[in-house]
Amino acid sequence: MSEEWFHLIGAALLAGGAFFCLGGALGLVRFPDILARMHAATKPQVFGLLLVLAGVGFSIHDGKTWLTLALVMVLQVLTAPVAGHLIGRTAYRSGAWESDDLVVDELSDDLRDAGFVRNEEFQPEREQDRPRPSSE
């Protein structure tokens, strides 16, 4: 394959990645609640970044560059879902979401079984949303 083909593939991947990143950014601004925004912040942004990094790899066309980009890709795929999960749990526990939007709420059962109580005035700096001490 000639060098022009690698640049063409790289440009197409960069454009596709930019499209997904734009979609994720619009979702952050336009979605109505925190759980939908969390989805927009993780799913399309990660996929868009992966496409952009692949586009850079095809454009530069160097083995060392691909190694570095692969490391960045792996770290992004490992950390973004964890961050999204933590944002969702924090939003749920703080009450910054609409309960009518959920069809199934499995987290409330898990938190209740673990002994957590929903505090209507959640203030983490005052540590008011902690598990009840066990009476054993």
Image (cartoon, grey):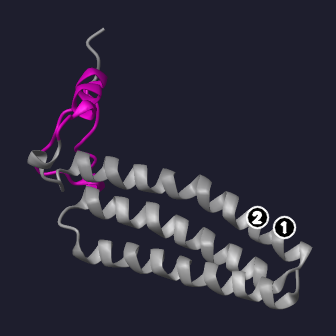
Q: Locate the N terminus and report the quarter of the image it occupies.
A: bottom right
Tell me, yes or no, whether the highlighted magenta stretch contains residue 128.
yes
Seen as rendered, the residue at the extreme front is 1
Give yes or no for contact between labels 1 and 2 (Cβ–Cβ under 8 Å). yes
The correct choice, above or below, for 94 with respect to 7 in the image is: above
Q: How many marks?
A: 2
Q: Residues within 10 Å of mark 1 (few under 14, many from 20)?
A: few
22 vs 40: above or below: below
Snapshot quadrant of residue 130: top left
Does residue 119 belong to the magenta stretch?
yes
Q: Residue at x 58, y 72 (%)?
A: 49
The kind of residue tagged 2 is Ala
In this image, 46 relative to 7: left or right? left
- Dot 1: what SS? helix
Cα separation, mark 1 vs mark 2, equals 5 Å
- Which residue is painted at 12% across and 52% down in the image? 98
In the rendered structure, the answer to whether residue 112 lies left or right of residue 76 reads: left
Q: Position of residue 38 (x, y in %)?
A: 34, 60
Q: Quadrant of residue 66?
A: bottom right
Q: Quadrant of residue 97?
A: bottom left
Q: Position of residue 79 (x, y in %)?
A: 57, 56
What residue appears at the point 17 percent right and 43 percent down from the top-left corner? 102
Residue holding disc 1? 67
Query: Over which residues does the magenta segment extend?
Result: 103-132
Amino acid type at mark 1: Leu
Up-down: is 57 above or below 110?
below
The label number, if any, that marks residue 70 in the structure image: 2
Q: Main secondary structure of the magenta part?
A: loop
